[in-house]
Amino acid sequence: MAFEPTGELRHYPGNYAVYLEYQQKQAAVIEAEPTKAPKSNGERSASQTSRSQQRRLSFKEKRELEQLELQIPVWEAEKAEIEAKLYQDNSGSFSQLQTLSEQLAELETRIEVGTERWLELSEVASSA
């Protein structure tokens, strides 16, 4: 969880490294936006126009967001179990260790992709 500049408390899945990565991406996006001179009162600025045209989540995306919020903690728990097996049981056969390592790599990829998608969807949901 983190306090946003607006004073809101926001929940981020994953660990602190995921949060920092997200914040760095956001800072890069903000820096990449060109600064514009203020418009006169009669003209609408690009930011005002984009706010009025902001995209909302579709039903499918809302459902996906809900599913990701449920699945990411499950994947994290599975990852912790596999890591515990890998680190505690050193007497296992090579094939068993290889299988566990492959499962761990698959889970890490699934968690990373799921977390990135969750961040995208939650940002759209919070901006609407």
Image (tube, rainbow, N blue to C red):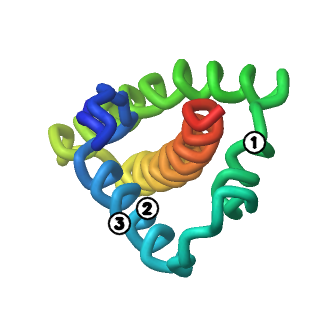
Q: Which residue is mark 1?
A: 52
Give the mark count: 3
Name the amino acid type tagged 3. Answer: Gln
Do the CB atoms of the residues marked 3 and 2 lie less than 8 Å apart?
yes
The image quadrant that residue 76 belongs to is top left
Picture quarter with the C terminus: top right
> In this picture, is 112 found above or below 88?
below
Q: For label 1, count other residues whose C-alpha is less than 10 Å away and answer few (under 14), some (14-19) or many (20+).
A: few
Q: For label 2, count other residues whose C-alpha is less than 10 Å away and answer few (under 14), some (14-19) or many (20+).
A: few
Task: Find the residue positioned furthest to the right.
Answer: 59
Nearer the viewer's eye, disc 2 or disc 1? 1
Point out residue 75 in the picture as x, y percentages from the top left corner: 47, 31
Point out residue 57 in the picture as x, y percentages from the top left corner: 76, 31
The secondary structure type at the circle numbered 2 is: helix
Q: Which residue is mark 3?
A: 24
52 with respect to 26 (left or right)? right
Identified at 43% across, 76% down, the residue is 31
- Viewer-side residue, 11 vs 33: 33
Q: Earlier in the sequence, mark 2 or mark 1?
A: 2
- Viewer-side residue, 80 vs 29: 29
Cα–Cα gap, marks 3 and 1: 26 Å
- Viewer-side residue, 22 vs 71: 22
The secondary structure type at the circle numbered 3 is: helix
Q: What's the mark number on residue 44?
A: none
